[in-house]
Amino acid sequence: MVGIESYAVYVPTGRLDRAAIGKTLKAPRRRGVRPVASYDEDSTTLAVAAVRRAIGADGDIDGSLWFATSSPAYLEKSNAATVAVAGGLPETCAAYDVGGALRGGAGALRAGLAEGNAVVAAADLRYALPGSADESEGADAAAGFVVGPRAVAELVASVSITRELLERWREPGEARIRTWEDRFGAEEYVPLGQRALDEVLDRCGVAPEDLRKVVISTPHSRTRAALKKKFSAGQADLGVVSDLGYAGAADLGVGLVAAFDAAAPGDLVLAMSVVDGADAFVFRMTERHRPGKSGLENLDTSTVEVSYADFLTWRGLLPREPARRPDMKPPVPPASRRTGEWKFGFVASRCRECDYRNLPPRRICLRCNSRDASVPEPMIGVPAHVATLTDDWLSESVQLPAKVAAVDFEGGGRFEFELADAVDQAVNIGDPVEPTFRVAGVAGNKVRNYIWKVRPHREEDC
Amino acid sequence: MATHALKNPVAIVGMACTKFGEHWSLSVDDILIEATHGAVDSVPGLELQQVDAFWLGAMTSGVSGLTLSRPLGMRHKPVTRVENMCATGSEAFRNACYAVSSGAYDVVMAVGGEKLKDAGYSGLEMPSVPNDGTPPVLSAPAMYSMIVPAYARRYGVSEAQVKEAMTHIAWKNHANGALNPRAQFRKATPKETIASAPALAGDLSIFDCSGVADGGAAAVIVRAEDALKYTDRPLYVHALALDAGSGTGRNDSDYDYSDLAESRVSAEIAYAQAGITDPATEVSLAEVHDCFTPTELVLMEELGFSQRGQAWRDVLDGRYDRLGSLPVNIDGGLKSFGHPIGASGLRMLFEMWLQFRGEAGDRQVPTPGFGLVQNQGGSPGDLVSAVTIVSSRPPGA
C-alpha cells in the first residue's frame, strides 16, 4: 500500500529570541525562540537538505518530485529542478513546483501520494514586516518525504475541501503579509477543519480517540488552538516541534515528521492543513517503521543565537552599507550547465590511474597528469576535515568575516569552501565538516549562485 | 628541461620610474608617457624613434600594444602587450630581453604601467573569465594569510613568532619607503602601531598588505656588447627565469600553504644561469614580491637566503634590513612603494638600476655582488614567479 517510505526535516541552526524583537521595537516580548535560515539559505537549499536527509543512503529514487513553498527563490525558472539535482535525484525524475500558496504543502503531499512513487519536499522562510505576529511566530524549516509502496506510514484516507477565502494574502516580492479580522478567519476555518476531520475519520472508520498523534497546521492561530481542543494534550503534543512556530508550506510536513517519529507500528496519525480550505490525511504506521534519524534529534540543543539585526539583514529588511568592493560576478548559465553535476550535485572525479579525487573534476589529473581517465565521484557522505582556515573580512559574503577553510576529504581531494553555519563559532584545524547546499550570493542580475559549502559536523550528522 | 643564460647577453642602458600613488590627476596615458619618455630621456642622445620594439606590461589598464603606441603617437612599431598577473612587469622585461638578444632588434623597451585607482576600490579587481560560480572567492589577503598557520606548524614556531617577523617586515619596508621620494607611503611606522592594527584576513592587518597604486616604469635594453655606447654604467642581465606552476596546489591535499615552489624553482633556474652557488652571500641586495608580509618571510627561504624554518629569526635579527647583510626591498617594496601591477617588476629593477649606479641617495648600499629581483603573481599553490639577476659586471667578466 502506498505511503511514506522515509521522511525527514531540516531546521536551520539559527534561533532568534522572540523577546529580542520586542526589546528592539519596544513592543510586548514574546516567549521562546524561532528558527532562522542563515544568510546563505533559501527555500531551495532548505528543501535540498530535507530531501537529502529523507532519501538517506538510498539514492535509487524512482518517480516524481513535488516541491512546495510560499517563498520561491525564482519565479518562471523551476526551483524543483534545482532541488532534484542537488538532492541527488536522477534526470528522469519529473520535478514540479507547487509554489506561492501556503496550501501547497498539503498539495505536494497529496500529489506525491497520488503518484505512488515520489519525493515530496516543502520548505519555507517565514518573515513579514518587523513587529508582526508572522515574524515572531514564523519558523524557517523544510520537510522531505519519500513516497512509495514500502511504506513505514501507509495512507489510510484523505479528504480535501477547497474554499475561496481571503483571510491572508501577500503580493509577490513583498514582505508584508496582510490579514483580515481574526474572528472572520476563526469563524470560517474552525467549522471547515471540523468538517474535514469528521469526513476523513468517517472514511476510515476511526474515532478521534483512536489517533495516536494529531498534526493541525494552519497560519491562523485561533483556529489551531480551537481544533487542538478536539484532542487530548498527548495526541496534539509534537514534542520538540511544538514551539518552533508556523513553518508556512513546510508546516504540515514538519508536524507530520514529528508525529511519525512519536508513533509506533500500528498507530494512526492524522495530519490536517487548514488554509484556503482543509486537507486531512490519516496514516497508519507499519511494521517497517523505525523512528529516528529524521533530523529532529538535537533540534533544540544544536542551535546558535541569531541577533535581531542579523535576522533583519539576512531577510533584506535592514539593508546595510556594503563594503567598497567590486560588484559580485554572477555565474553564467552555460558554464553552470556544463558543470552541473559538480556545481549542483557535488560530484567530483576520481582518477582511475592514481585514485586521487579531483575537486572540481578535471580532464588532466592534477596528481598524475593522466588524461580523460577519471570517473564521477559523488562527494556527499565522504568524511572531511578542515586542513587550514582563515577569517576573511574582505569577502563578498553577506556575513563578515567569512570563514574560509581548505578541506581535505578522506581518501583524497581538497577544496576551499566558505564555512556555513559558523557565525561566531570556533572552528579549528582538524575539525570534521559536512557538505551543505547554499547560496554563495545573489548577483546584480538576480542570478542566485548555488554552490556546495561545508559546515561544522553536528551530532545528527552521524 | 633546458634553460640557459642568454647566448647574447643584454643590458639595461636607461630607466625611469614614476612616483607611485593615488594619481587622481593622471590617466594611464599620462603614466605610460612619463615612464617611456623618462627612460628614453635617461639615455643621452637616444630618441624614441630609435627604439625598435616595445613590450608593454599591463594587467587591467588596457589591451593590446595600442595601449602604449596610441598615447605616444608612435607609428609602425612592433608593440606587444603581455600579462602574467602581478609578475607582468618582469614578463615584459624578459620578453624584451629575448628579442634584443636574438638579434631581431638592436634597441628595445620594456614598459609597465597601471592605472588602478580609478576603479574606486582599495583592493585589486582581477579580470575573470565568466564561470559557473564555484571557484572559491577569497580576497588576496585571505589567500596569503593561509601561510601563517602553515609556516608555524611546519617549523614548530608559534603564530605569535611568525606575526612578530611579519611586523618587522612591515616596519622595515615602511622605514625604507620613507626614504624614497617615489614611494606611495612615506611614513615610518612604529612596530606597536603595526602589531595592534585590526585584522583584515587571518593574522594580516592593513600593515601586512601592499598598497594598490597607479604608476609606471620603463627600461631601455640593448645587447651587452653595445651597452657602453649608451651609458658608462649599464646594468647587465645575468639571468631571466620564469616558473608557472600547475595552479593545482589549492586542490591538492598534499599541498602546504607555506610552500611557494614556483618562487624556489624560478630562483634555482636563475642561479644556474648566473653561476650563483651560494645566494645568501653572492646576492648583495634583493627586491622581492612582498605583496603581503608572510610572502616576504617565506621568500627568504625559497630564494635560499635563509635556512628552512629560520627566516623568521633572520628577519628579526635584522639581516634583511637596509643596513643588514642582505638588504631586501630597500626601496620600500610593494608594501610602501605601492603596487601598480604591470609596473612592479620594472620598479624593482629600477631600484637595482639606481643602486648599482650609485644613485640611490639616502638608500644607497654597497653592491659588490649580484642584485636579485623576484616578482610573482597568483596565490600560494597557484603561482607564477619571475626572477631576474643583474649586476654592474657583464656576464662572464
Image: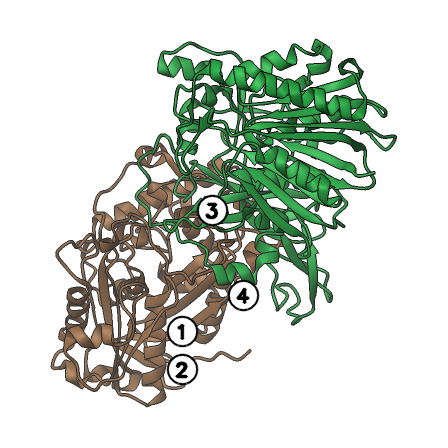
Q: Nearer the viewer, mark 2 or mark 4?
A: 4
> Which numbered dot is residue A75?
3
> Which numbered dot is residue B240?
1
Q: Where's residue B191, x and y in %?
A: 32, 36
Same-chain status of marks 1 and 3 = no
Looking at the rendered image, the quarter that the C terminus of chain B falls into is bottom left
Element carrying mark 2: loop
- Give the CA separation, mark 1 to mark 2: 8 Å
Same-chain status of marks 4 and 1 = yes
Looking at the rendered image, the quarter that the N terminus of chain B falls into is bottom right
> Which numbered dot is residue B6?
2
- Give the CA separation, mark 1 to mark 3: 57 Å
Q: Tags 4 and 3 in contact by the CB under 8 Å rule? A: no
Element carrying mark 4: loop
Q: Which chain is green?
A: A
Residue A9: image quadrant is top right
